[in-house]
Amino acid sequence: MAFPHRPDAPELPDFSMLKRLARDQLIYLLEQQHEVDKLYKVENKPALSSSEQLCFLVRPRIKNMRYIASLVNADKLAGRTRKYKVIFSPQKFYACEMVLEEEGIYGDVSCDEWAFSLLPLDVDLLSMELPEFFRDYFLEGDQCWINTVVQALHLLSTLYGPFPNCYGIGRCAKMAYELWRNLEEEEDGETKGRRPEIGHIFLLDRDVDFVTALCSQVVYEGLVDDTFRIKCGKCHGPLLGTSHMAGLVFNEIRNEHFSNVFGFLSQKARNLQAQYDRRRGMDIKQMKNFVSQELKGLKQEHRLLSLHIGACESIMKKKTKQDFQELIKTEHALLEGFNIRESTSYIEEHIDRQVSPIESLRLMCLLSITENGDARCSLDTHYGPEHLLTFSNLRRAGLLTEQAPGDTLTAVESKVSKLVTDKAAGKITDAFSSLAKRSNFRAISKKLNLIPRVDGEYDLKVPRDMAYVFSGAYVPLSCRIIEQVLERRSWQGLDEVVRLLNCSDFAFTDMTKEDKASSESLRLILVVFLGGCTFSEISALRFLGREKGYRFIFLTTAVTNSARLMEAMSEVKA
């Protein structure tokens, strides 16, 4: 059921070193430098500590600075004197210091940094846990987090040796790569002479492939994330509580298409029952061995099995209520370019029923990108004009695109024009047009064969390619690009694809002659997603690795999904 790696697959590096390094740094910072003896979660409520020193370990976010300022000013009003220390992780921003100064407490606090930027979520998954990266860079154009990416890459090359082969695509990817290379040259002695453990690194911007992130996920781990939300490797759903998504059962089903999961869990339950039934007819000595050696493991497996069966039932209830099959059918039609009129009608009906603004936005963006900007639906009259700013954000980021320059007003602009004067409406239209980005998804899809041609029904039990992560309808664009570049060891032959992606100036290859690289390390590939990656992409590349004899390691600014993308763009707070 699970995807076993080939016997000749290379071993993954030991990322537990990163955990130990981060833990030791934090213990030194808190206990030895600042004498911290108790930890509290930063929440929007008064601090109950009676200590004469407060130490805040926070992300460099404006709202955190406002919270700290409110506590310090409350102490001042109460006539209380304390020492205040702010530790920023992973780095300190000038904007945060400015807020502290505006609030009149800059002189009352001292600041420090904890450069922790890599959290191992799995044996092959590292996350920077920076969900704000996507909005900050791809919408606001804020480059403040790029240095954090550079430092993370530098740490990996310091610990695991240099990367002989580097590839990338995207403006952010190229910028991060060039800054990282400059840093490597400045500190050449640290990796000089080291044997590479990872043979290839591939940097990819999220805006190179929005389509994959906008699609509904149907692999088990992706569906759990879409339904319950997985954060920092833990599921926060009502059934799974805060239990870590680990254990043998989960490892066997995480990358599977959801249609296969119930059958696997049922068979697992039968096998488990058979193991329990072995107790019958045992003598005292055998029973003693069974209880001491097997019973605890069986009970643990039974608990995990019950957990995932309950999760599956909850997912089924929610998806049945949402008419999930019809939704998937619509998405597949958009991806394949068929029945666009029916798909548009489905989206309009979805909006009319006011199911969910986030879900409606997602479908509109998918329609817009796959049909080169042909989005004929509108939200403002159904959910309110407060969504106009969200529309503007989506267009600026390239998630809503226009069909061609000089075309008639889109639906949303037509609605806006009824609310304002003709002159103002014209200005809004001009502003929208100047911000819009073009999409060439249909042409890219044909060039890279993203829509598989299958005679008969696609066999999801024995998948033949990466398209299984979307029920055989679509190979993730990001994964196909990675596959093609790795096969060629360059972008040669992909010039037209790069042009259609609007990345002609931002696709790069850097291959250094590395005699020390072993054949095993050359089959290890580090994929860096800037702006987030989905569990579907992770599952697809794990499948590709099994087929080709590679092992993929994933480094992402955060794990994302379609809802998170839309929420990042939204100006309407839930």
Image: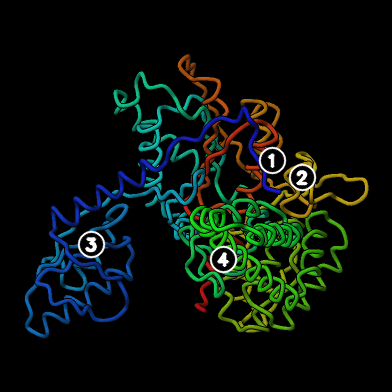
- Disc 4 or disc 1, which is closer to the eye? 4
Secondary structure of the residue carrying tag 2 is loop
Residue at the far right: name it: 456
Amino acid carrying label 3: it is Glu
Relative to 413, residue 514 above or below? above
Secondary structure of the residue carrying tag 3 is helix
- Disc 2 or disc 4, which is closer to the eye? 4
Q: Which of marks 2 and 3 is nearer the N terminus?
A: 3
- Residue at 13%, 59% (x, y): give it: 35
Residue at the far top: name it: 515
- The residue that disc 2 covers is 450
Amino acid carrying label 4: it is Arg
Give how far apart the Cα atoms at labels 3 and 1 are: 43 Å
- Disc 3 or disc 1, which is closer to the eye? 1
- The residue that disc 4 covers is 303
Secondary structure of the residue carrying tag 1 is helix
Relative to 512, residue 94 above or below? below
Mark seen at residue 97: 3
Pick the residue in front: 279 or 157: 279
Q: Which of marks 2 and 1 is nearer the N terminus?
A: 2
Give how far apart the Cα atoms at labels 2 and 1 are: 8 Å
The quarter of the displayed image where residue 274 is located:
bottom right
- The residue that disc 1 covers is 480
Crowding around mark 3 (Cα neighbors within 10 Å: few <14, some 14 to 19, many 20+) is some
The quarter of the displayed image where residue 299 is located:
bottom right
Q: Earlier in the sequence, mark 3 or mark 4?
A: 3
